[in-house]
Image (cartoon, rainbow, N blue to C red):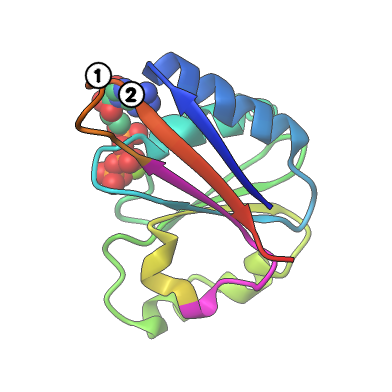
Amino acid sequence: MNERFETYSPVETEAFGEKMGREAKAGQVYCLSGDLGVGKTVFTKGFAKGLEVTEYVTSPTFAIVNEYEGRLPLYHYDVYRISCEEEMEDTGYEDYFYGEGVCLVEWAELVKDLIPQDAIWITVEKDYTKDDDYRLITIRQEG
Ligand SMILES: Nc1ncnc2c1ncn2[C@@H]1O[C@H](COP(=O)(O)OP(=O)(O)OP(=O)(O)O)[C@@H](O)[C@H]1O
Ligand SMILES: [Mg+2]
């Protein structure tokens, strides 16, 4: 699977995240990749909404992982500041990545080796030839 979507505002990216959140199934891992400030957390806020999370979602900068209650449990990782695999182990990631909730991992490429094979990869990119608010979102899943 390899799909491309284009958005032209944060609202559109959030709405796209919400659609994916509505379709998310138990046990899935979503990996978000893309530059600083490109829109990963905007996507995540929508995604959480789609999973019927009512709590306010922020990036788990210090905690590495935040847990939210929704239609399914949501485990929101931001691994930007992870410096070693041990820090990931301390979060008990295996129970989450291979559990029955839904995981969403910002900066997943930094812990690529730990990500399950069947994860869904979402890349958000700007295009400097286009409008400032333009984003290209690419969805990939192996197999
Ligand atoms: N089409 C768009 N989609 C998403 N965000 C957009 C878009 N256009 C502009 N933006 C802006 O880009 C910024 C994205 O911020 P966000 O925190 O989501 O980035 P991030 O990828 O999570 O960054 P970080 O790597 O620091 O966690 C916001 O200020 C948002 O308003
Ligand atoms: Mg973020």
- Front residue of this view, candidates 53 and 38: 38
Q: Which residue is drawn at 44% across and 62% down?
A: 108
Residue occupied by mark 2: 134
Is the CB of the residue bearing disc 2 within 8 angstroms of ligand 1?
yes
> As rendered, which of 19 and 8 lies closer to the eye?
8
Under mark 2, the amino acid is Tyr
Residue 51 in view in this figure: no
- Residue 55, position as x, y percentages in the image: 55, 28
Residue extent of the magenta highlight: 113-124
Q: In which quarter of the image is ligand 1?
A: top left
Would residue 16 be counted in the magenta stretch?
no
**Residue shown at 42%/73% (left/top)?**
111
Name the residue at 40% across, 66% down. 109
Residue 47 in the image, given as x and y percentages of width and height: 58, 33
Q: How far apart are marks 1 and 2 (CA)?
A: 5 Å
97 to the left or right of 110:
right
125 horizontally vs 53: left or right: left
Quarter-of-image position of residue 24: top right
Contact, mark 1 vs mark 2 (Cβ under 8 Å)? yes
Q: Which amino acid does label 1 sit on?
A: Asp
Position of 116 relative to 34 (above/below): below
